[in-house]
Image: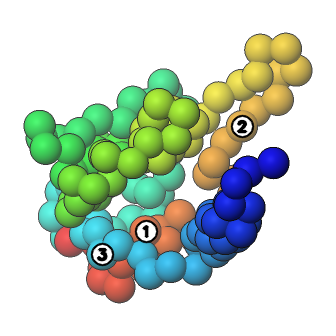
Amino acid sequence: MAEDFHAFATAGAQLAAIHLRHETGPEYPLKVVCTPPGTSDPAHYRLGHKAMKYAYANAEKSELIINEHIHLQGIPPEAHRYEVNGRTPLGWFIDRYKISTDKRSGILNDPNECSTTPEILSLRSGESCR
């Protein structure tokens, strides 16, 4: 029904490729910073059971405070320009990646259970926690 069906088909194929292959792209080189400096205990990477709130350490939103031990530095400004349903992907992460219990079912959602190596942040960044 479109005047130029092939243009829509091409755009659709490109969009599908982006959605299907987004996890294969290169990772952005964030810096994992430990507090206090020089400490790197795998337990520091776990989310706590208290209601944890992520926060940005500066107005530019280039540093995300994960918990009292871990900060991620080097978040590019472009990360805050792209939105999906009114939020950035990082905003969705901040909202959803936390320990919570479903009110209706009582099922506990604990992201800590998804990995046996919570310190994967430092392994992926290619450097140890500083």
Can residue 69 be seen here? The reply is no
Q: Which residue is mark 3?
A: 29
The earlier-in-sequence mark between 2 and 1 is 2
Residue 10 left/right relative to 80: right
Can residue 2 be seen here? The reply is yes
Closer to viewer: mark 3 or mark 2: 3
Q: Which residue is mark 1?
A: 121
Tag 3–tag 2 contact (CB < 8 Å):
no
Identify which residue, 77 or 126, lies in the foreground: 77
Which secondary structure, mark 2?
strand
Q: Residue at x 47, y 47 (%)?
A: 89
Q: Residue at x 75, y 32 (%)?
A: 108
The image position of residue 39, as x and y in percent, is 26, 66
State the CA–CA distance, disc 3 to disc 2: 28 Å
Q: Which residue is mark 2?
A: 109
Residue farthest along the top direction in this orientation: 104
State the CA–CA distance, disc 2 to disc 1: 20 Å
